[in-house]
Amino acid sequence: DAQNPIYRAEAAMCRFRATGDAGKPLEELDEAVRADPRCGLAWYYMGTIQGHAGQRAEAEESLRKAIKLMAPDRRPIDALKELTAKKR
């Protein structure tokens, strides 16, 4: 179901991994979180891609949202730690 936000998030992340370009995947993830703001996976992938694209402030905000929504999953916590370690 292409309207499912988890499906959309996974498809966007696959597109990013395949192309390395953040543009279209970030648009797709933005649409996924607009459809369901409680989709932690979409926020997590968005933060991950934003971090790779150099959008550190946006990435940090997205990952913080993902942490709240995905608990007890540690992936967003680890990604935020990695992001802040790069900042230093």
Image (cartoon, rainbow, N blue to C red):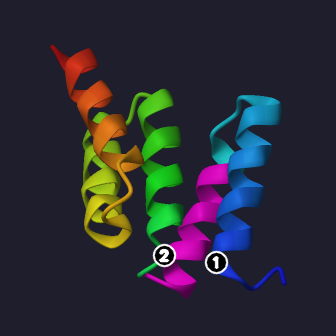
Residue 40 location, x and y as percent? Answer: 44, 68
Residue 16 location, x and y as percent? Answer: 71, 40
- Give the residue displayed 37% in from the left and 36% down from the top: 55
Q: Which quarter of the rendered picture does the N terminus lie within?
A: bottom right
- Give the residue displayed 77% in from the left and 58% down from the top: 11
> As drawn, is 41 to the left or to the right of 28?
left
- Give the residue displayed 53% in from the left and 40% down from the top: 49
Res 32 quadrant in image: bottom right
Mark 2 residue type: Cys
Magenta segment, which residues?
25-37
Q: Label 1 near label 2: C-beta < 8 Å?
A: yes
The residue that disc 2 covers is: 39
> As drawn, is 69 to the left or to the right of 64?
right
Q: Quick check: is 14 in the magenta stretch?
A: no
Q: Secondary structure beneath disc 2?
A: loop
Question: In the rendered image of this protein, does residue 81 appear above or below residue 87?
Answer: below
Q: Secondary structure beneath disc 1?
A: helix
The residue that disc 1 covers is: 5
Q: Nearer the viewer, residue 23 or 29?
A: 29
